[in-house]
Image (cartoon, rainbow, N blue to C red):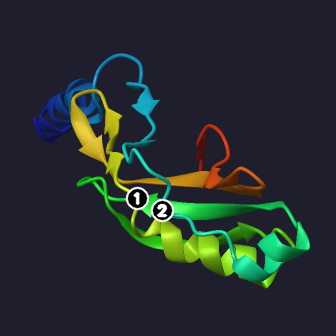
Amino acid sequence: MRGYITMRFSRAILLACPLVAGCGPEEPIELPRPVNAESPFEFPITLWDEGVEGETRLMVHVTTLGEVDTAYVKESSGYAEFDSAAVAGVGNLRFTPGRKGEKRVDRWVVLPVKFTREGAALGGALEQGT
C-alpha cells in the first residue's frame, strides 16, 4: 500500500510541474523605450570649446514605472566630463517600461549617449544589459 501511495504522489508532482513552470515557449521581452521629446544631456562647455566629441555607454536600470533608479558608466568616452554629464542627464529620462507579455518588468539596458557638434543626445538603439 505504501508503494502505491508513493507512486501516485510522484505522478501528481510530475503532472503538476508543467503547470507551475508555465506552458509553451517563453514570452519575448520588450525593452524599455525613452519617451522624452528633448535630450536631458548637457554638453560640457570646456569640451565644446575644444571641439571634442565622444560617446559614453551607460548601464541603466529602468523600473516598472519607467523611471531610472540606477545608472553607471559601462564604457567610458575617455573624458570624465562626458561620462559625468551622461550619468547626470539619464536620471531625467522617462521610459515606457519593459514588458514580458502584458506584464511590466524591470530591465537593465545599455544606453549610448553621443556628444557631437550637433549637441548631446541618445546615440542609438538600446541594448539588453547584462
Is residue 72 shown to the viewer in this render?
Answer: no
Looking at the image, residue 18 lies above or below residue 106: above
Task: Name which residue type carries label 1.
Answer: Leu
Is residue 21 shown to the viewer in this render?
Answer: yes
Could you tell me residue 39's position as x and y percent?
50, 55
Could you tell me residue 44's position as x and y percent?
69, 77
The quadrant holding residue 49 is: bottom right
Q: In front here: 97 or 36?
A: 36
Q: On the rendered structure, is 100 left or right of 53?
A: left
Could you tell me residue 1's position as x and y percent?
10, 35
Disc 1 vs disc 2: Cβ atoms closer than 8 Å?
A: yes
Q: In front here: 105 or 13?
A: 105
Looking at the image, residue 10 lies above or below residue 26: below
Q: On the rendered structure, is 84 left or right of 67?
A: right
In the rendered view of the protein, which quadrant contains the C terminus? bottom right
Q: In front here: 66 or 94?
A: 94
Residue 40, disc: 2
Pointer 1 or 2: first along the chain = 2
Task: Name which residue type carries label 2.
Answer: Pro
Numbered disc total: 2
Secondary structure category for the residue under label 1: loop
- Density class for disc 1 (Cα within 10 Å; few <14, some 14-19, many ≥20) is some
Residue bearing mark 1: 93
